[in-house]
Amino acid sequence: MPLHAERVEWTQSPPLAPGDGPIDVDHLKRMTLGDPALEREVLTMFSAQSARILGELAALPAEAATHAHTLKGSARAIGAFAVADAAAKLETALSGGSDPAQPLAALGAAIAEARTAIELILRR
């Protein structure tokens, strides 16, 4: 039985080591298939979503771990890996019953840095 070789188009996976900066622009380009309009749209949505969720998390509602989990996924999708890592630490603290004050502060700092970077990207 002869073997048939086919050409398969592969999509790059996320980097093993995220790029420098609050937003990994190369990752963002891969996730948006290089569409600048889509990049702008998802960055705008993430900026608004992250600010809203951070505000909600400040009150530490019962669903705070779920909010942190949602933010973690959104951040990973756009290449905001520092935000994703901080959200994961907050989610772990909340789920484990640990004091969330430090992880929440770290998440706030990561979001502020990412939003500043997004603002700069959107001005281009």
Image: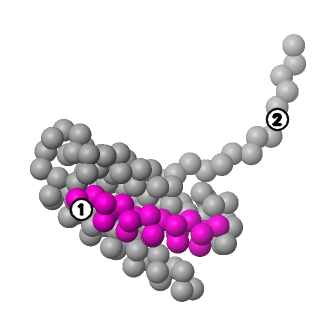
Q: Which residue is mark 2?
A: 6
Quadrant location, the N terminus: top right
Question: Is 83 or 29 nearer to us in this picture?
Answer: 83
Q: Which residue is mark 1?
A: 58
Question: Is 29 or 118 nearer to us in this picture?
Answer: 118
Residue 81, quarter of picture: bottom left
Percent position of residue 31, x then y: 60, 57
The single residue placed furthest to the bottom in the displayed view is: 123
**Which element carries disc 2, helix, strand or loop?**
loop
Span highlighted in magenta in the image: 38-59
Amino acid type at circle 1 is: Ala
Amino acid type at circle 2 is: Glu
Percent position of residue 82, x then y: 34, 61
Percent position of residue 93, x then y: 20, 46
Residue 3 falls within the magenta-colored stretch: no
Residue 41, quarter of picture: bottom right
Other residues around mark 2 within 10 Å, as few (<14) / some (14–19) / many (≥20): few
